[in-house]
Image (cartoon, coloured by chain):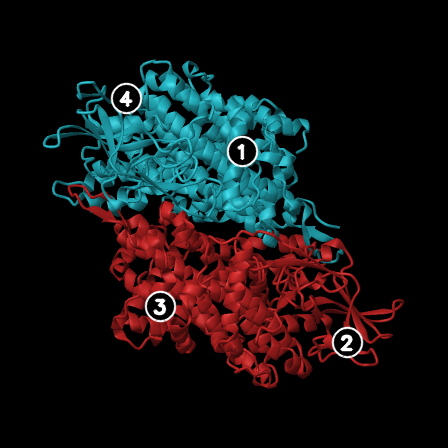
Chain colours: A cyan, B red
Amino acid sequence: MTSTDLVTALRASLGGRWAHVREHTRKEFDAELLLPDPSLSIEAQRDRVNEQMRMLAGSQYARAGFPAVAGGSDDIGASVTAFEMLGHTDLSLLVKAGVHWGLFGGAVTNLGTTRHHETVLPQIISLELPGCFAMTETGHGSDVQSLGTTATYDPTSDEIVVHTPTASARKDYIGGAARDARMAVVFAQLVTGTPDEPLRHGVHGVLVPLRDDTGAALPGITIEDCGPKMGLNGVDNGRLTFDQVRVPRTNLLNRYGDIGPDGSYTSPIENPTRRFFTMLGTLVRGRISVAGGAGAATRTALSIAIRYADVRTQFAAPGSDDEVCLLDYRTHQRRLLPALATSYALAYAQNDLVSLMHDVQSALLSDTPPDEHRQRELEALAAGVKVMSTWHATRTIQECREACGGAGYLAENRLPSLKADTDVFTTFEGDNVVLLQLVAKGLLTSYRDAFGDLDALGTLRFVARQVASTVAERTSARTWGMRLADARPRRPEEGNLLDRAVLLRLLADREQHVLGGLARRMRAAAKPGADLFAVFNDAQDHVLLAARAHVERVVAESFARGVDECPDPAARALLDRLCTVHLLHGLEQERAWYVEHGRLTAARSRTVTGLVNTACAQLRPDALDLVDGFGIPDAWLAAPLLHPLP
Amino acid sequence: MTSTDLVTALRASLGGRWAHVREHTRKEFDAELLLPDPSLSIEAQRDRVNEQMRMLAGSQYARAGFPAVAGGSDDIGASVTAFEMLGHTDLSLLVKAGVHWGLFGGAVTNLGTTRHHETVLPQIISLELPGCFAMTETGHGSDVQSLGTTATYDPTSDEIVVHTPTASARKDYIGGAARDARMAVVFAQLVTGTPDEPLRHGVHGVLVPLRDDTGAALPGITIEDCGPKMGLNGVDNGRLTFDQVRVPRTNLLNRYGDIGPDGSYTSPIENPTRRFFTMLGTLVRGRISVAGGAGAATRTALSIAIRYADVRTQFAAPGSDDEVCLLDYRTHQRRLLPALATSYALAYAQNDLVSLMHDVQSALLSDTPPDEHRQRELEALAAGVKVMSTWHATRTIQECREACGGAGYLAENRLPSLKADTDVFTTFEGDNVVLLQLVAKGLLTSYRDAFGDLDALGTLRFVARQVASTVAERTSARTWGMRLADARPRRPEEGNLLDRAVLLRLLADREQHVLGGLARRMRAAAKPGADLFAVFNDAQDHVLLAARAHVERVVAESFARGVDECPDPAARALLDRLCTVHLLHGLEQERAWYVEHGRLTAARSRTVTGLVNTACAQLRPDALDLVDGFGIPDAWLAAPLLHPLP
């Protein structure tokens, strides 16, 4: 990692609002302790991660995301940023820390009340009470609202009875459950009333102790180990089955739904579905952290592959004895440089997302009345960025592995664990396909609000259930209207395709066209008596395209804003070219749509690949500076392939 | 695995010329012994693979690929087919067996002569002499012609001295080297003459003993372990460094280049480059076996993911309490069914490839004068099918993992090891990008031969070196001419896109257009004094597109032929629909090209996605039969997720 003025400026621009946290972790994190050791057995990997966890517990980062009342420092953005930096190290640590402090601690913070904050949170911060987050069941993953586990209030003992009614209702894949967690927040269907007249209130979180001080499972709790996984083997994922396990009534995390001493249920939110999604919405930090971790891991992989491509040579050029550097081959530039550009784009989008989350969730902690619009905006952005970042990670780390050939297949060179550890990111904390459906649903809802021309959204009731959070889009009615004016299609033969404004306008125009078409299609199809499942199912490709088009535009705008706001002229000029590569490459991938819809002539479409080629070639001399702009210390990039043998 | 008449007919059609070998392995292979056990440590995995190897050594399959003189049964196609079936089991075994019997045994068979066949081959067949194939070096992988290891004839002792002159010339990633191999065929630059006047003859293979009976490395040989890898951890990959290691002169594999007792070098092939590529060309079996293994692993993954999608439900449909089966969701059909169709396509292409290889290599063994044209045809087809099969494996197994969610991430459900083990297939036995360049080069050479209008192919001298085999295309001048007539473009608004002939014509037309354009571009650019590297490098996307377009057409034709030759009417009708899905999906992916080049109107292009959707939905009821058509016994698909909990 070199530090010229240019690189320093790039790093500052990409660092975002919590750049100081990044700088601090670069100095503080000990690569020796934090990098993965692929030679270890699974149990030894788990031990190593626990050792890393204890190091973190002693640092300021464990406290950062928690309220002052519990000994925290009320700086959510700093917490999530430090967590993101862990994504450059052992990803098992990232996930284990995320489960304990983020999901378990976050649930207690956001769903619990003072009684939990004062007693439980300090033990969570200090890691005295390792915890886990028991939501997913074997039978229900995406459809959390249909969980089978029950939490039934027993007035005779003033206890809640947690129970697993069927084999498929066991909690599954629960990080920390197999070995280390002492307590779980268990998500279960809350039931009050009497056996004859049960009152069902939907899914709530309940604190359930799992193990005694010796680590043995408590009575009524069966724990199984999920065994070896594709990656993240430093995390002890397990299965939990509850047989009539009793906990005090006060173990209910009762911010959004409470049981009084008299057994009566009360909630500030009347509608059970709305209540459920409100609760889940407060847990958005997990999804945001996964997006951040995916981004960091991808930047690690690109740093390794691009640096390798700059030192590795193969084949002499014609008429020469000197072998050609891999990164001088156009094919190799095409494999790595557009991905580098997109990694910058997603990093800027992630910074915007974390900043929004910090503001929204800080307000939540400070008892300011919740701003539902901003909360929905946050959830939609989180879903979209998570999808793009995690699929980008899967594709890009794969490409990096292949671009490093046999060396890339050796564990010592990091790419295997980066690939395997991040692989689950596309399907946990919300399956990417389901999340895209939610983004689209939010867009349609907002479209209706803006134009009032979408009467029959009955089909969307179905989508609405496919949700781990209610999503809406970022764009208010007003900006929709503005964009209608701005993004009015120009003639397909006009506009310089190297002009960033033209490329952004194409993206915005596509988003609007696809969404408008989808809205009309839904309205036309959702006639009385229509088979709503068939209508929804038939439109799937349209639904997913609408969501993608939206998120791609939002991410591109984050990048463009980041470029414009970069104060250093040389860095800004370089970022501008990088942004063009990101946009042009996106256009190349999607050019069929633009030609089919009269936005590009066939003749202009044919030129796009050549434009990407040239832009990549022009970026090649800057590739190492751009990698250094990621700001990953050399010690964190320990990969022998970066040091070629004589 | 059910066996209705339809399924039996599908299996017979897909089984190809060695369907009887497939049937036999289905009964013979013991899943208990042959499936991977992900809970084992690396050393235990290696032990297990050795146990599996001993089982194979006692079977007819080890003998099948070897000549009768050595106790073999002269049935190369049977050998490669049985090897392909191992691709459904532990892929470490596939690779270890492939290295020992295929690469090591194949090199001794094809590069050695009677003295090696009679003495060494029987010990190879029986596994008494475990061997490895020491070609790749740390510094040279794709560019094998530039290997650094030397093999210098010493007339004073009548020995060959094998030596590693630089650190980067160590042999690397060598399967079997770290622990088990007793002998290596070492590829090295052969030198005769005197130290003052050395005579260099290019790369040759030399048999070098590595270990004594106790397993200790012999003097002058340093062996290192490559350590943990992304996958294939049952294979003991290692590094070999030779310090002036002496072996008898007769250890030279001397079919294509020999040293006489007087120290003089002779070869039936004068030109050293041509000699080198001829030698390598005989080793094409490794590449073909990798393609076969990739195909089998992909079919295993699809069988798991599609069966899971048929039993797994999530979310109730609107107005219903019944949850919807994943495979009834259009998004899920789109993720899995086109990949299923393409897996059939590639399986037919692989059958054609193995059949051609059997004929060409059987002739080689029987001392029939080699048919260079067919040998080149074989190498081109092998390169193309290997590229398509291995990238298809990488993409499809990834998709299958994601389509199975968290369950797909657990090792017990097989997908993690299928993904990790096959990952290296895209870069070993010829890096896929380099192989595509070679396919294109062969096409251009043949284009020039056919039309005589391509004068300045100087740029291709550069491509020619990027080769582990000389490649040419399958199509002689005559069929080029015929295709010109057949594939004459129709008007872009004509032709039924559900008509297989129309879809095939589009593919053939595209191939011809892209190749013709590339040839003209090369001719125009390769002026005297031109920077040949720049010319070649600038045209890379065009080069790769030409190769892809060619291979896609060849694979599609294999599939179409397979459909037409299926004797069972019901199976033929189903395969016909499946072939249409493969072709339509390919068209969808590449539709930008067709519109840009006036082969499709924008309006027709817009309909393609809808056609794929409908074709997938129509295929959905047949999905399980098609999976059963792969003929993978239930015991080989041991994955708990296929048995949902109540």
Verify CB contact (< 8 Å) between mark 1 and mark 3: no
Q: Which residue is mark 3?
A: B631
Instruction: Identify which amino acid the numbered label 2 is placed on.
Output: Arg
For mark 2, name the chain. Answer: B
Q: Which residue is mark 4?
A: A250
For mark 1, name the chain. Answer: A
For the N terminus of chain B, the image quarter is bottom left
Same subunit, labels 2 and 1: the answer reads no
Instruction: Identify which amino acid the numbered label 4 is placed on.
Output: Thr
Same subunit, labels 2 and 4: the answer reads no
For mark 3, name the chain. Answer: B
Q: Is residue A561 above or below residue B491?
A: above
Cα distance in 3D space between marks 4 and 1? 32 Å
Q: Which residue is mark 1?
A: A51
- Disc 2 is placed on an element classified as helix
- Front: mark 4 or 3: 4
- Front: mark 1 or 3: 1
Cα distance in 3D space between marks 4 and 3? 57 Å
Cα distance in 3D space between marks 2 and 1? 57 Å
Same subunit, labels 2 and 3: the answer reads yes
- Disc 1 is placed on an element classified as helix
Position in image of residue B386 (x %, y %): 51, 64
Same subunit, labels 4 and 3: the answer reads no
Q: Which residue is mark 2?
A: B249
Viewer-side residue, B413 vs B144: B413
- Front: mark 2 or 4: 4
